Amino acid sequence: YKGYNPSYQYEKPPPTVVGWSTPDDLQNTFVSPSGYDGPDIACHVGATPAGAEAPVNAGDTIEVQWTPWPASHKGPVIDYLAKCDGSCTTADKSKLKFFKISEVGLVDAAKDVWGATQLMNNNNSWLVTIPTGIAPGNYVLRHEIIALHAAGQTNGAQNYPFCYSLAISSDGTANPEGVLATSFYKPADPGIHFDLFVKYTDYPIPGPPLYSGA
C-alpha cells in the first residue's frame, strides 16, 4: 500500500492512499520541540487523514519504507497506534489517543548504533508488529524518527512523524488507554535535549511507556 508523497497534490485527481496527506512537507521538514504542543506533532506538518485504510491482522508485521535516511541523523524510532471513532478517513488528529507499540533507541553505544541506524542499514525500511490482543477496528499507525544530531542545543531535536490508516482484524478485546500526541514530549525531556557529541552509555527513550501487550 502506498503512503503519501507531496507530489500527489499535483496529480488530477490525486491517488487514494493509506498514508496521511502532508502537502506542505515539500522539503523534508520536521517538527521541532517548540511545536510539541501543536497539531503537527501528531502526524507531521499540516497532516490530514488518508483516504483509505490498509487491511491488516493483529500480529501482522508491517514494513514502512522511507526515502534515503542520512547517517548523521541518529536517534530513536518509535511507533504508536490510536483507535479511530469509526472511519479514520474523518479522524481528528487533535483528539486521537495514541499508545506506544514499539521503540528502539540506542542499540550499541560503543559502535554508535541507533534505531535510525538500523532503519538506514535495512534499506531505509522499518518493521513494526501489530499487537495481537487489541480489539478490532480502524486505527492510525504513527511512525516516527527523532533525529538528535542538533539536539544538544535548545529546540534542536527534529521529529519526523508520519501516519497511516489501518483496518485491523483481531480476536482481541484490549482497548489500551492512549494519550494525546501533544502530551508525548517536552522540550527539556532528557531524550529530547540530548547531546550526541559527548560520551554517553545509555539513552532515555522519550514519550509514554510502552504498551504492556506490545
Image (tube, grey):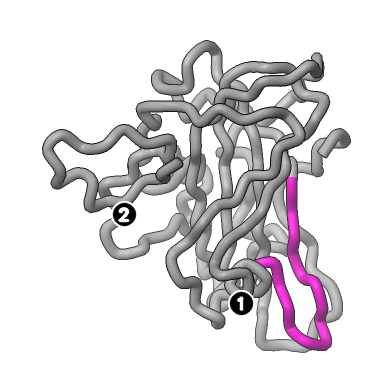
Return the mark for residue 25: 2
Lateral position of residue 11 relative to residue 8, left or right: left
The label on residue 170 is none
Residue type for callout 2: Asp
Q: Which residue sits furthest top?
A: 86
Occupied quadrant, residue 212: top right
Residue positioned 19% across, 44% down in the render: 9
Badge 1, how many Cα within 10 Å: few under 14, some, many 20+?
some
Residue at the image position 22 percent from the left and 52 percent from the top: 7
Question: Which amino acid does the dot numbered 1 rest on?
Answer: Gly
In the depicted view, which residue is nearer to us: 12 or 98?
12
Quarter of the figure with the C terminus = top right
In this rendered view, identify the residue nearer to me: 137 or 75. Answer: 137
The percent coordinates of residue 120 (x first, y second) are 58, 72
Indicate left or right for 113 with 125 as reference: right
Q: Where residue 8 appears, x then y in whole percent?
A: 23, 46
The residue segment tinted magenta is 102-116
Q: Is residue 110 magenta?
A: yes
In the rendered image, residue 156, in percent from the top left (x then y), is placed at 52, 70
Q: CA distance from mark 2 to mark 1?
A: 25 Å
Up the image or down, 197 lies above or below 207; here it is below
Q: Read off the residue under disc 1.
A: 152
The residue mark sitting in front, 2 or 1, is 2
Circles 2 and 1 in contact, beta carbons < 8 Å = no
Q: Residues within 10 Å of mark 2 (few under 14, many from 20)?
A: some
Identified at 64% across, 34% down, the residue is: 81
First-in-chain label (2 vs 1): 2
Image coordinates of residue 33 in percent, x first then y, are 52, 57
